Amino acid sequence: MRKNSAKIVKKIKDFILENNLIEKNDKVMIALSGGSDSVCLFHILNTLKKDMGFSLYAFHLNHNIRNEAKRDEDFVLDLCKMHEVPLFLESEDMLELHEDSGMGLEEISRKKRYELIYKIMKENNINKTATAHHLLDHSESIILNMVRGSGIRGLKGISVSNNNIIRPILNLTKEEILCYIEENDLKYVTDVTNFDTDYSRNNIRHNILPHLEEINNNVYNHFFELSSIAGEIDDLLNELASKIVIINEDDKVYIELKDYYSLHTAVKKQILFNMLNKLGIKKDINSKAINNIVDLIEKNNTSFEISLINNIVAKRRYDKLYFEYLSKDNRESFRLEVDNKNKFEVKYNDIFIKLEKKDILDKNSEDKYVDYDKIRGKLFLRTRQDGDKFSPFGLDGSKKLKKYFIDKKIPKEDRDFIPLLSDEENIIAVIGYDINNKYRIDENTKNILSINYKTMRGKHERRH
């Protein structure tokens, strides 16, 4: 083994030992995509397995998304066969799962991948699964979490290990990985979607991090140091937050507020994050929602409800604060007949909707406009129903409203609360987003219906 490669292998072995990632007699499975990162991890662990006394396996999931998916599968098969490493091979139609799930493609792919990993681990008594996350991935995660508005937990980035998922090369730079690949003449496959900057992570990788590296070429290690500090702070907050007992009860959790008030604000927020964790929400949510809950409690609002992520609602009932799943049957539904199509105003939650018939179009207005005379029968303002379809502006055909929400990246937890304007045949407008292409204004339009939409957030008003 060449000099640089030997140093890298030692660096990884020391990292594994320092963090207790692999112990003697462990059965370790690698999530092997066939890309440069996972091939590097595969080769290093295969080099270390005899010395460290663990056995090695591999897992590959064919997502069937790209034309090269079968090529990647065949590459992994050949690689494992050549090194005599047992391979668990799975195949899923991820596009179909994406369509049915209501989740983003990246999100449902990750969810399914880990479901399969845990299933295989359980069935085969495998102790650990190793993923090929490295310093660049780690830095991307921290920036992405910051952009999304997460709290101190977001600064932790990717953890070294959690739930028997280990990341043995998290301390390697991308340059070290490519150096190792080159020195050992390792073959690998390239995922072309890694260069698609429409994906948030790739946008950060290709358009943001290079500029940060120009400022300081040690930026990735500094992100790693930052995550360690954030982890220490998170541990301290958890220790202080443990003074408040979180009670589990069916599909909800709650706390007694009696001893809550005397705590530091940071500890109060940590308790709320921990309540979400108890409900299975591991992904950090936007801190704004948590701040709103803290503020409402401080103002001694004895009864309130706030919608969070994944159809979870935060509710205060006197001296108790609840986080609970909102069942589909109990979600707020809304249906109102528009009794005057010429002029109508209504307030729905914190949304103000105004409909007005006009004969001229105001080009300086932010209102949405549709052809009044194309309306069929009565008008309704309502929320979504099973089987709804919509024809967005610019699209001649129609698509399921669920698919439209997915394409617009509207969070799943928000979709049941978005008001729709419909007549007796179609959805005319998804209020705040698009109008139906069939109702667009054209050269034959004589009468116009304007749709004005405003939301009220505290003292600040926003128009869409």
Image (cartoon, rainbow, N blue to C red):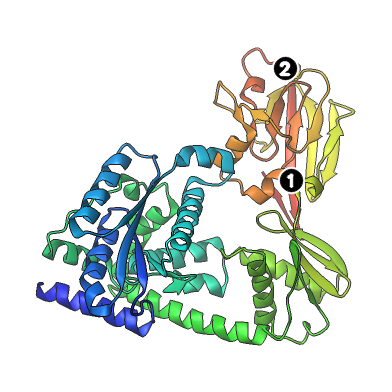
> In the image, residue 148 lies at what x, y percent?
54, 61
What residue is drawn where x is 35% and y is 71%? 170
**Which mark sits nearer the N-terminus, 1 or 2?**
2
Q: Is residue 441 above or below residue 149?
A: above
Left/right of residue 23 with respect to residue 286 in the rendered view: left
In front: 380, or 133? 133
Q: Quadrant of the N terminus?
A: bottom left
Q: Is residue 7 above or below residue 138?
A: below
Q: Quadrant of residue 438?
A: top right
Marks 1 and 2 sit apart, C-alpha to C-alpha, by 26 Å
Query: Is residue 138 shown left or right of residue 46?
Result: right
Tell me the residue at 28%/53% (across/down).
34
Give the label on residue 417, or none: 1
Q: Position of residue 91 (x, y in %)?
A: 40, 44
On the image, the x and y values in percent for residue 347 come to 84, 44
Considering depth in this image, is 86 or 98 the residue closer to the camera? 86
The amino acid beneath tag 2 is Lys
Residue 453: which disc?
none
Q: Residues within 10 Å of mark 1 (few under 14, many from 20)?
A: some
Q: Secondary structure at mark 1?
A: helix
Q: Which residue is mark 2?
A: 374
Q: Is residue 392 left or right of residue 342?
A: left
Name which residue lies at 39% across and 53% down: 203
Badge 1 amino acid: Phe
Residue 199, visible in the rendered structure: yes
